[in-house]
Image (cartoon, rainbow, N blue to C red):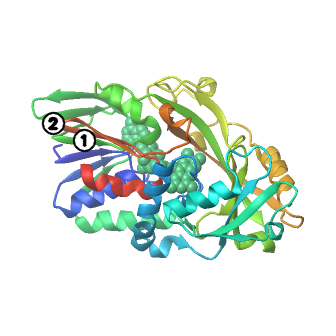
Amino acid sequence: MRYDHIILGAGIYGLYAAAFLGKKGIKVLVVEYEDGPFRRASWINQARVHHGYHYPRSVSTASRTAMYYRRFNADFPFAINRSFKKIYAISSVGSLTNAPQFLKFCVHVGIPATEINASAYFNPQYVEAAFETEEYAFDPFVVRDALMERVKETGKVDFLFGARLHRAERQGGVYSVAFKDGTKVEAPAVLNATYSSANQVLAKFGFQPMNIKYEICEVIMVGVGERLKEAGLTVMDGQFFSVMPFGLAGSHSLTSVAFTPHLSSYEKLPVFACQAGNPECTPGQLANCNTCPAKPETAFPYMNQLAKKYLSPGMEMGYEGSLFAIKPILLAAELDDSRPTITMRLSDEPSFVSVLSGKINTVYDLDEVL
Ligand SMILES: Cc1cc2nc3c(=O)[nH]c(=O)nc-3n(C[C@H](O)[C@H](O)[C@H](O)COP(=O)(O)OP(=O)(O)OC[C@H]3O[C@@H](n4cnc5c(N)ncnc54)[C@H](O)[C@@H]3O)c2cc1C
């Protein structure tokens, strides 16, 4: 099979790229490990349309997401949940920021923040200040369906689902890619949009891996009572938590800096003890944590305990289920907690571009490299 462009990965980055290229008349093959799109991080995340507030220690990440905030909301207006108040609170103990610094940061980035009475949501003993902000949630399934529709409209994009990448070779002006079932595909251009498997794909194409750390993360779905229903709450900045609407379906997600990551790997190709429980998952190719028989036990009791300490009485939540995905984090980003989207053009003829995404709404960074 011969295409103009091969895209590895059918998350938001891969599908956005497929629609972008297909619209230009370019014949694209999207290759995906799973049996369908959006089975990993593009579904399993906090669903926050970042406006910048989350990154008071990285003005570059904050400014970048703030820049794309309106574009994403305008691009997927039907997928956006605007029906809640987004409150950022500053912990009075152990925070890496404080209320005056946070406000100064918001002014600097140009994002609105209005101080409110913290005791409306929080135990005032543990919260220095709380601010109403402007930030929404997106529904991953609605975004997925809209992107699949856009891809289909181009009439130029084929999919290879359930693909097991075997070998990639450069042959003159093309990459020749072979799969374990014997399928072979050629194209003069490849985009690596595999996120947590980015280094694994780089290794197969003969490129140097990036310095990243891998975290197996748990995003918990909770049911909330009336008082919490119309709120999204995030306590900053350090080992705290967030509870906020997850898309449009009515659940909230619960995450915490200390308990969301269960296991970490600092190897260039990811090594986890749990891989012993799943022969499909190796340092050479990650399988899907969410469907893995060896996935970790939920950390809900710990996250719930932490949230209870901070929230005012009557803000209970009930466990509905857990979603697991791997988050790759650039080691250089550990210090300031930044989440840049890295795009790298590693070869020109044939063309090889690799993206390691930081956030959902920085997907528009692809425009430049595509
Ligand atoms: C716990 C968590 C919370 C987050 N919260 C937010 C948030 O609230 N807001 C936000 O903006 N961002 C958030 N993010 C970041 C965001 O989820 C990612 O930046 C984004 O989803 C990455 O999209 P992607 O398309 O690159 O990756 P993915 O959606 O993971 O897609 C990559 C695809 O590549 C496939 N693949 C892997 N290996 C191969 C291979 N060899 N061949 C073919 N296909 C392969 C995978 O199966 C997968 O479908 C969060 C991330 C995590 C993990």
Q: Within the image, what quadrant is residue 207 found in?
A: top left
Residue at the disc numbered 1: 190
Residue at the disc numbered 2: 350
Secondary-structure class at tag 2:
loop
Query: Measured from the top left, where is residue 179 in percent x and y?
Result: 31, 33
Residue in the picture at 50% in, 65% down: 110
Foreground pick, 311 / 118: 118
- At label 1, counting other C-alpha atoms closer than 10 Å, the crowd grade (few under 14, some 14-19, many 20 or more) is many
Residue in the picture at 10% in, 34% down: 173
Q: Within the image, what quadrant is residue 153 found in?
A: bottom left
Foreground pick, 52 / 306: 52
Residue 271 in the figure: left or right of residue 10: right
Residue 20 in the figure: left or right of residue 40: left
127 lies above or below 120: above
| Residue type at tag 1 | Val
Is residue 356 something that shows in the picture? yes
Query: Measured from the top left, where is residue 69 in percent x and y?
Result: 46, 65
Foreground pick, 284 / 368: 368
Secondary-structure class at tag 1:
strand
| Rendered-image quadrant of the N terminus | top left
Q: CA distance from mark 1 to mark 2?
A: 8 Å
Marks 1 and 2: CB-CB under 8 Å?
yes
Is residue 47 something that shows in the picture? no
